Image (cartoon, rainbow, N blue to C red):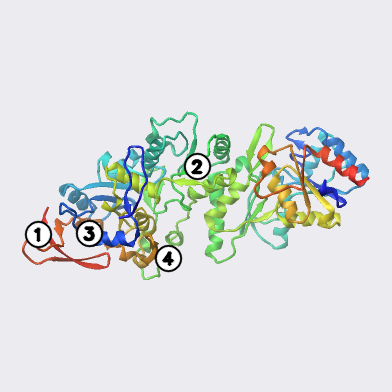
Amino acid sequence: MSWLKRPVKGLLLDISGVLRDGDHVIPGSLEAVQRLQASGIPFRLVTNETQVTVEKTVEKLTKLGFTGICPSSIFAPAPAVAAHLRENSLRGYLLVHPNVLPQFEGVETTEPNCVVVGDAAEHFNYERLNQAFRVLLSLRDKEEPMRLFSLGKGRYYKEEDGLCLDLGPFTAALEYATGAQAQIFGKPNATFFQAALKDLSLSPEEVVMIGDDIVGDVGGAQGAGLRGVLVRTGKFRASDENHDTVKPDAIVDNLSQAVELIMNQNL
Amino acid sequence: MQSSSYSNKKGLVVRRPDGIRGVNEYLNNITVNEWGRSSIDRFLINLSGTTHDGNKLLEGSARAYAKLKMRNKKFRYLNGSSSESSSTTLKHLASIGFGILKQELYTAVTSTRDYLQAKNLRPHLVVTDDALQDFAGINTMHPNVVVIGYAPEKFNYETFAVCFQKIITMPGKHAKLIAIDMGRLRDTTQRWCFENDQYESVAAKNVLKTDQQCQKYEQDVYRAGADPDVGTGPFVKGLAHACLEDDITVVGKPSNEYYWNAMFSLGEEYPINCVVIGDDVDNDVIAAINAGMHGCLVKTGKYRLGDENKLFTTGFPPVTLPVKDRCLVVDSVEEAIDKLTQAYYTVDSSKGEKGLPLKVEVWGREFEFYRVGN
């Protein structure tokens, strides 16, 4: 249990695949979160969810029985990107799910000079990708940087009925088409983890990330200096036990077991 | 000569010379094989940009066709489009006055079909409904590969979600993704106009043969006022990213398989006996040379001033040289056919007809040819 040698002063938890699986709570997660809240160990929920707003995510979790969750406890890519666009007065071509558009209020969309790719799911079609492609090419033509922002770069995520294609492939398509390099907001980008750490006022060595995506959650966290723990729920696949590049600090059955181990160590 | 080989199911094996020694051997024997014939006797002629430009048949195309038939040469006209069936292509060609026969056409879609049959693969097809016709008779039950051609109406989340599911559940360690083409841009010399059921030529002609420096063709068309369309390549790359498939097999232009399959359809197994005649220096000429064939650059269609000076690396051990040192550069297809189907000729003056020799500069060297007869 070497990963527990250093004290755990804070936690970052993934939502989908750790707390819930689709519309069901993962067994033990409700109690685990309550235990954490009672113990006083601070934590944040770190998600790449881009099909709904942060407020909606809170609502869904509350409906499932989680208490004490508010928008400020959640870190998601869309608000981060929207803020970036507003701060830099950028006008965005938003290839995002319509449900997440409210997060982009105040962002100009006419005559776009950047492209934002989110989890648009069935709203990904040839027409929209072609438009995004043309925006990037016109930037190249004007010798401006090809600003391509991607809300994460996940390849797939788990829904109840199986694995679903995420937005990563569409970002990769635009990168190949134009030669642009996407700037990733969200996991596994280190800046994203650092923002959450700053919010916790803790340093990386003091925090553990718990997630089901070996590359996005665990790999990303380790890249930012945190400890990364993989759970065998959500989109976990047996092949993740022996991943080529990422070696999790620990692999546990679920959040409940992780919290149990942390609590026992901290006593 | 050293050679590398690729075998299709029919047992035909590609034999090509490797190395500069092989090439020089060939050049020394360029017009003579043991029967005294020119050893280039298979002609693969590009259609779009070389033979026709949109709805306009280019100068000399019809005469070139007539000469090929008259001189009894074996040829195929090539269509690199990954979204068009053979019958649609033939119909269009007939409508602009170029009525070739079905067996004289070889398309990227046909190449895909031949490849699937040769390798015994069962495809999940993502192609236009038109192109689907050319796959009739191919077994698509329990697919073990996913095949993608340019099909914008099908390029949406749902389609790729299905492809993703199929690929991750396919057993076996073979390459599971086949792209008919990997173009970043759709072929922008033409736009298939569904409403008029006709080809519409994008204003590429306005930028032809200017004094500008050699520019990338894609940017030229874009600046000429035509909006670019994203092609097949990016979508295939995206799907490959999702499934962690590093291996994407390209079976259409400008892959080796495309030219070899066209060659196999002529019953030929030596690419060194074939010449590819096209206007696109990268995807016709250099691609042909990489496949072990000869290239011939025609100054029409996508051609830009200076294309013939483009440096490329070829051979084993590799040499870097300008394209014009390894290919014929001509103004039209007719000129290409004339130069390449000159009567049987030989460099051996004792065998030829009396009279002045024909001096021709080919591949950067001057040859004296003596006519033997047709």
Task: Identify which residue is drawn at 15% across, 59% down.
Answer: B346
Q: Is residue A133 above or below residue B325?
A: above
Task: Identify which residue is drawn at 62% across, 48% down.
Answer: A168
Label 1 chain ID: B
- Tell which residue pokes out farthest to the left in this image: B354
Q: Is residue B340 left or right of residue B191?
A: left
Front of the two marks 4 and 3? 3
Q: Position of residue B178 (x, y in %)?
A: 47, 43
Front of the two marks 1 and 2? 1
At mark 2, the secondary structure is: loop
Residue holding disc 1: B351
Pointer 3 and pointer 1 on the same chain: yes
The Cα–Cα distance between marks 3 and 2, rounded to whole angstroms, is 39 Å
**Which one is earlier in the sequence, the residue at label 3 or at label 2?**
3
Residue holding disc 2: B175
The Cα–Cα distance between marks 4 and 2, rounded to whole angstroms, is 35 Å
Pointer 3 and pointer 2 on the same chain: yes
Q: Position of residue A84 (x, y in %)?
A: 71, 59
The amino acid on which the numbered mark 2 sits, given as a three-letter code, is Ala
At mark 4, the secondary structure is: loop
Residue holding disc 3: B30
Q: Is residue B169 above or below residue B39?
A: above
At mark 3, the secondary structure is: loop
The amino acid on which the numbered mark 3 sits, given as a three-letter code, is Ile
The Cα–Cα distance between marks 1 and 2, rounded to whole angstroms, is 53 Å
Task: Identify which residue is drawn at 38% across, 31% down.
Answer: B136
Mark 2: give few (<14), some (14-19) or many (20+) Cα within 10 Å. some
Q: Are marks 3 and 1 in contact (CB under 8 Å)?
A: no
Label 3 chain ID: B
| Location of residue B313 (image quadrant) | bottom left
**Which one is earlier in the sequence, the residue at label 3 or at label 1?**
3
